[in-house]
Amino acid sequence: MKLGIIGSGKIVKDFLSISKYLNDIEVYAISGTERSKTIMEEFKKEYGIKNIFYTYDELLNCEVDTIYVALPNNLHFEFAKNALENNKNVIVEKPFTTNYREAQILSKLAKEKELFIFEAITNQYLPNYKRIKEMLPLLGDIKVVQCNYSQYSSRYDSFKAGVALPAFDSKFSGGALMDLNIYNIHYIVGLFGKPDNIEYFPNIERGIDTSGILILEYKGFKCVCIGAKDCKAPIANNIQGDKGCIFQDTPTNVCDGFKLLMNNGESKEINDNNYEHRMVNEFVEFSSIIKSNDLEKCYSLLEHTLIVSEVQTIARSKSGILFPSDSI
Ligand SMILES: NC(=O)c1ccc[n+]([C@@H]2O[C@H](COP(=O)([O-])OP(=O)(O)OC[C@H]3O[C@@H](n4cnc5c(N)ncnc54)[C@H](OP(=O)(O)O)[C@@H]3O)[C@@H](O)[C@H]2O)c1
């Protein structure tokens, strides 16, 4: 894969730090604003990136085959669509788009053009998550699932001081649901599919959810997803069935080792993750799927992304959290 990156913020720094594990991916070009010139030059030097561009058109017209959209949430749709229109495969950071309408447009376009499009959502590709999925039948009938991703954000201090950074700004499709709870939605939808009912109870400050509780109802069981950027608590994910429970104490985007705790007293600790950094597995899979031209696999992953997008859109619309592109 010949990769072109748009954006040079926190997630790009993370991605570049793992690029040494990605033998099939050449980071060929990076594109961003003049504001980010210094950091892009540093990246170019440290990671041997061939080109820096200051317009997106130049990136789209160079010889990359895949674009990694690593921009604030509100820009994912426009930049991904533009990439598809220019016959590039796309990897879009989470959350895929601002809303379900945009997600459907990207999906349709990618399929029409037989291009690859992926949401970069770490948990779906982590060995521990795949193992949890396999082990679910051991738990008996699922009754309750709880995922708590609460992380006090240093940006919340700025927000309280009156500065609205993208993560706390509805103009940028920010907020706790889009930033953190989205991982919990992926985690649960990946295990159980589309919920029958969705309710979101947000704490809203200045028009944005700084934390909130999402309830996903399935036939026979309920899931509680907590996402908070304004307070913190020990991370805990519990999948509880009538025969046992799976307990994990790392966030749903990291999925480190977990415990299987059976009602009969048996217990087991499992850790199948094979890389220290959560992002390696997803990019290994993206490049392998593209290399083997496995559009079917890509589009089945895309179906999962579409369900998650629908869930977050319903959750927001029912609780009155609307972003500018929701009203188009
Ligand atoms: N997968 C994960 O674990 C994970 C973790 C964190 C974030 N993310 C996702 O990654 C995305 C980016 O987050 P981040 O934390 O990296 O944000 P960030 O640090 O704020 O970086 C955003 C980047 O976008 C650039 N940018 C903004 N507007 C642009 C435009 N019009 N044209 C070109 N570049 C533009 C910014 O450049 P300037 O500063 O020059 O404007 C900056 O380089 C978000 O969608 C977030 O949800 C994913």
Image (cartoon, rainbow, N blue to C red):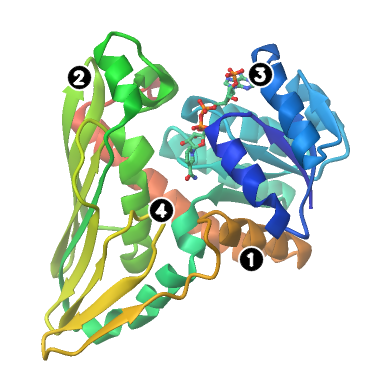
Whole-angstrom CA distance, mark 3 to mark 2, is 30 Å
Q: Amino acid at mark 3?
A: Ser
Q: Residue furthest top?
A: 162
Please, is residue 92 above or below residue 114 in the view? Answer: above
242 horizontally vs 112: left or right? left
Asked which secondary structure carries label 3, the reply is helix
Under 8 Å from ligand 1: the CB of mark 3?
yes
Ligand 1's image quarter is top right
Asked which secondary structure carries label 1, the reply is helix
Q: Which residue is mark 1?
A: 296
Asked which secondary structure carries label 4, the reply is loop
| Mark nearer the N terminus (3 vs 2) | 3
| Mark nearer the N terminus (4 vs 1) | 4
Q: Position of residue 279 (x, y in %)?
A: 55, 54
Q: Specify the label residue 253 is tagged with.
A: 4
**Image quarter of the C terminus:** top left
Whole-angstrom CA distance, mark 4 to mark 3, is 27 Å
Q: Residue at x 24, y 53 (%)?
A: 235
Q: Amino acid at mark 1?
A: Glu
Q: Which residue is mark 2?
A: 205
Q: Specify the label residue 36 is tagged with.
A: 3
